[in-house]
Amino acid sequence: MQENITSYDTTKHHIHIDMIVTNPKGIIYNVAGILDTGAPRTEFSDQFLVHSGFIETKSEQVKLKPGLQTQKYGKIILPSVTICHHQINFFEVFVSHFEPSWGIDALVGLDFFRRFRVTIDYSNGILLTRQIGKG
Amino acid sequence: MEKKITWNDMKTKFPDEWLLITDFDLDQSGHLVAGVVERHSRKKDDVYQLPALNKPTAFRYTGESTFSGLRDHAREHNIL
């Protein structure tokens, strides 16, 4: 089974990756995210989900609680998300409020790590990813 | 019509800003290398406001991310 190679910038404090989300109209969106083993499930920012037409409005009531980095307040199923060259169909993710200063629209959480074997080759700045249970 | 510029040029021209980019090129790892900046602002809401452009779109922030993951949580509980 195919093992994909994705480079990342080792000068940053986290592993930043870029991903592709396709909305129901077939429009492709390229968004920035971070691999986050502290997130139980992948989360997308409500601002991005509104712009791309997945939700109608973002909640104006949501504020970050002290000690929390994101504030999850809903779930949505994205028809197609491509992370590290792996296309995932019907991917259930959290809708979250993200602080703009984070500079990202997605946190890739443990649900991705459950589906894919992820090897971090830090010295070379690459991720090796392979779908679990397929070769 | 705006001109296609490189990601490095975007960071120089629009420091610490959010960008909405079209007609973009990606490298083999999916990282953005060039594109046309259609919107830019220090305020994320300005860039993400509707209407959408109905064509392939990339969003990027040219500043440094302040995301610190569980570190903030740990600090909050005096673990670090």
Image: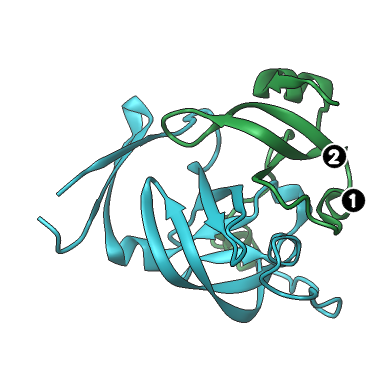
The residue shown at (69%, 49%) is A102
- Name the outermost residue toward the left: A135
Query: Of helix, strand and loop, which one carries label 2?
Result: strand
Give the answer, above or below, for where B51 lies relative to B25: below
Q: Do the CB atoms of the residues marked 1 and 2 lie less than 8 Å apart?
A: yes
Residue B70: x, y in percent?
55, 60
Residue A79: where, in percent of width, then height?
Answer: 49, 69
Q: In the picture, which chain is cyan?
A: A
Q: Position of residue A58 (x, y in %)?
A: 79, 73
Horizontally, residue B40 falls left or right of residue A74, namely: right
Which residue is at the front of the view, A79 or A129? A79
Tell me: residue A59, above or below residue B70. below
Q: In this image, A78 relative to A53: left or right?
A: left
Residue carrying label 1: B46
Q: Is residue A126 visible?
A: yes
Asked if residue A110 can be seen in this view, the reply is no
Q: Quick one: which chain is green?
A: B
Q: Between marks 1 and 2, how big is the CA–CA gap? A: 8 Å
| Amino acid type of the residue tagged 1 in the rendering | Asp
Tell me which amino acid carries mark 2.
Arg
Q: Earlier in the sequence, mark 1 or mark 2?
A: 2
Q: Which residue is mark 2?
A: B39
Q: Residue at left 49%, top 30%? A: A9
* Quadrant containing the N terminus of chain B in the rendered view: top right
Horizontal placement of B53 versus B78: left or right?
right
Q: Residue at x 28, y 58 (%)?
A: A116
Front tag of 1 and 2: 2
